[in-house]
Image (cartoon, rainbow, N blue to C red):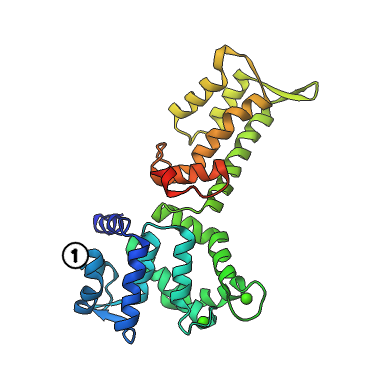
């Protein structure tokens, strides 16, 4: 990623969703007839939030104007705030006629501007507007689960949270993942480890055991992408006290917290930051932690 993209993302990640929302409300009151803003207007609206608006304007610039909807999506997605609140904010913003639901046209605009804006911010080649348009036609049927011709709030939320494409994109480029997503990753990682165990396990009196030597060999073959130092650490834990065989139960007791850690470590840095920590507590407790717990 280019430095200018990184710098903008870093800046956007310091904004609070609440403030982004306030600026957008101000826009709706005072400028809502303009969808595309030239530099001076953009600066007037966004300088209270960004101070220096030039880098963001430059990234989103198209023929010396910035589409307000793209700015709103970008600022909202990267801002600091609860993921559900972000979705709610976007849902309301794209419900242009305030019907409390999103129709085909509104969803089309949302998908179009979201894809273009995210490509601009992370600095990847944009698909053509035509190919996005084609995608939006097929997407509507997918999102409108009960087929009543409109997308309600639940349908919108579920679509974004369940969509692998959307979630993978967000995770890869923004480092944002939802609790649901982390949980799914956790189960996948755990299943992976269980498979390694089962492949070398033997049954004895209704319990599965593996020989440590075999387990180590299998881990090395099966998990070459895992950092060697980490694999060693896990092996040491499994091998604690020099045991030569390990039961499935003991294996799980060590591997489950490890899988929680891996699922929460969203950028695979092997270090947890504050946002990972929030996901980690979530996975352990099954509910969203209060802000106090992650400070
Ligand atoms: Ca609507
Ligand atoms: Ca519907």
Quadrant of the image for the C terminus? top left
Q: Is residue 58 left or right of residue 159?
A: left
Return the x and y of residue 58 as percentages of the image width and height.
Answer: 23, 68
The reply to whether residue 58 is visible in this rendering is no
Quadrant of the image for the N terminus? bottom left
Which quarter of the picture shows residue 191?
top right
| Above or below, 200 relative to 225 | above
Q: Residue at x 55, y 40 (%)?
A: 284
Q: Is residue 265 left or right of residue 209?
A: left
Label 1 sits on residue: 52
Q: Residue at x 21, y 67 (%)?
A: 53
Return the x and y of residue 218 as percentages of the image width and height.
Answer: 59, 27
Dot 1 lies on which element? loop
| Above or below, 179 relative to 160 | above
Q: Residue at x 55, y 61 (%)?
A: 163
198 or 275: nearer the viewer = 275
The reply to whether residue 3 is visible in this rendering is yes
Return the x and y of residue 25 as percentages of the image width and height.
Answer: 35, 75
Q: Is residue 34 left or right of residue 153?
A: left
8 or 116: nearer the viewer = 8
Which quarter of the picture shows residue 128?
bottom left
* Residue reaching furthest to the right: 205
């Amino acid at each position: 990623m280019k430095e200018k993209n990184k710098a903008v993302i870093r800046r956007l990640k310091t904004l609070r969703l609440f403030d982004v929302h306030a600026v957008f409300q101000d826009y709706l009151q005072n400028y809502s007839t303009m969808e595309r803003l030239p530099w001076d207007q953009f600066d007037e609206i966004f300088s209270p939030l960004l101070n220096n608006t030039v880098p963001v304007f430059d990234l989103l610039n198209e023929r010396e104007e910035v589409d307000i909807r793209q700015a709103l999506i970008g600022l909202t997605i990267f801002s600091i705030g609860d993921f559900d609140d972000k979705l709610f904010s976007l849902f309301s913003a794209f419900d242009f006629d305030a019907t409390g639901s999103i129709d085909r046209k509104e969803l089309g605009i949302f998908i179009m501007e979201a894809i273009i804006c995210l490509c601009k911010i992370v600095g990847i080649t944009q698909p053509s507007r035509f190919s996005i348009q084609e995608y939006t036609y097929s997407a509507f049927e997918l999102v409108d689960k009960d087929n009543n011709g409109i997308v309600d709030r639940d349908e919108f939320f579920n679509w974004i949270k369940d969509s692998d494409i959307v979630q993978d994109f967000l995770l890869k480029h923004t480092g944002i993942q939802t609790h649901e997503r982390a949980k799914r990753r956790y189960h996948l990682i755990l299943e992976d480890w269980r498979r390694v165990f089962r492949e070398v396990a033997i049954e004895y009196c209704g319990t599965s055991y593996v020989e440590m030597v075999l387990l180590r060999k299998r881990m090395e073959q099966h998990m070459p992408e895992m950092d060697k130092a980490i694999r060693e650490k896990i092996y040491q834990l499994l091998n604690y006290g020099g045991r030569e065989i390990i039961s499935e139960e003991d294996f799980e007791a060590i591997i489950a917290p490890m899988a929680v850690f891996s699922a929460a470590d969203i950028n695979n840095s092997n270090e947890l930051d504050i946002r990972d920590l929030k996901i980690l507590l979530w996975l352990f407790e099954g509910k969203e932690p209060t802000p106090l717990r992650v400070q």
